[in-house]
Image (spheres, rainbow, N blue to C red):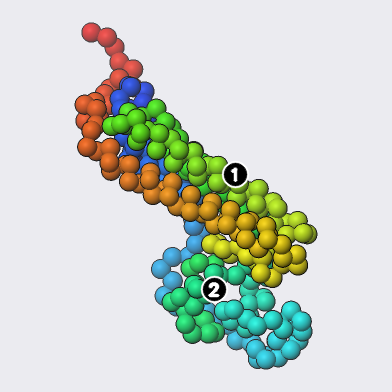
Amino acid sequence: MAGLVQICARAAQHLTITPLELFTAAFIVPSVATVYFWANKPQNVTEPTIITVDWTIGDLLLSAGDAASEPYEDTPMDFVEKPARDGWKRLPSLAHFGLERRPLERIPNDYSAPPTTGTDAQFVIIWLVSVVHSIIQIFGWWFPFPTAIESIIWRISAVMPVVIMVAAAVLAAVKTQPWFDFSTSVWWMSASQAKRQTFVRMHLFPIAVHGTYMLYFVSRLLILVEIFATFRAMPEDVYARPEWTRFWPHAGS
């Protein structure tokens, strides 16, 4: 928060704000969200709570019937633990990366449920945090960059993630439609198991989705590169400190 106060003070006194400062301020938004949602999370847990039951996994699978008939991806309890992950699979090349043994003995850190019923609120919150985080970097539109080309690169790279996040929200809404039968994951979209396998559905649509992912990655990378590239030619007032006393009322001499 001190960095945000510093940026506001510099803006109020018309001092140059560096892209690094703006980039840092943008991460305050997800940091605040993380602190809020982790506020009641148990910390320093040293002893597990073991729950004993009077039935076996085999008994549970038999009683579940068709719900447990599909081959599991991580554990036999997939149908219970991740009911919202229908059609939500990892990229095949990464399905066993670092997790060669099945069933899993730990929960991977890449679980991400799709925006289906029961997770809509979570998706909206994550989406809003991501959009606000990206919008903050657009304020660098008017920053002085060493060259005009670098200014254009920053502007395009700052706007692109916002556009992509809006497109992601549209895609999330489309995924709730009955006709949407694509197999999706965080990094992949495929029509290999779709009911209608047309050329557009099999190739063009997935290419557009994957190209969007790549544009997002390149945009974020260019912003990161430009942050350090601007250090070679900074305005003199970058090294000037805000006059904090100007913000406090005091009697004139």
Residue at image mark 2: 92
Instruction: Kindly identify the residue that appears in the image at 30 percent across and 20 percent down.
Output: 246
Could you say which quadrant of the image residue 209 lies in?
bottom right
Q: Nearer the viewer, residue 92 or 17?
A: 92
**Is residue 108 positioned above or below 1 on the image?**
below
Instruction: Kindly identify the residue that appears in the image at 50 percent across and 67 percent down.
Output: 110
Instruction: Kindly identify the residue that appears in the image at 49 percent across and 78 percent down.
Output: 96
Q: Nearer the viewer, residue 92 or 16?
A: 92
**Which of the two discs, 2 and 1, sits closer to the camera?**
2
Mark 2 or mark 1, earlier in chain: 2
Percent x, y of residue 27: 41, 46
**Is residue 163 positioned above or below 217 on the image?**
above
**Is residue 38 positioned above or below 197 on the image?**
above
Percent x, y of residue 168: 60, 50
Percent x, y of residue 97: 45, 75
Q: Nearer the viewer, residue 251 or 168?
A: 168
- Secondary structure under badge 1? helix
* Residue 98 appears in the rendering: yes
Residue at image mark 1: 166
The amino acid marked with disc number 1 is Val
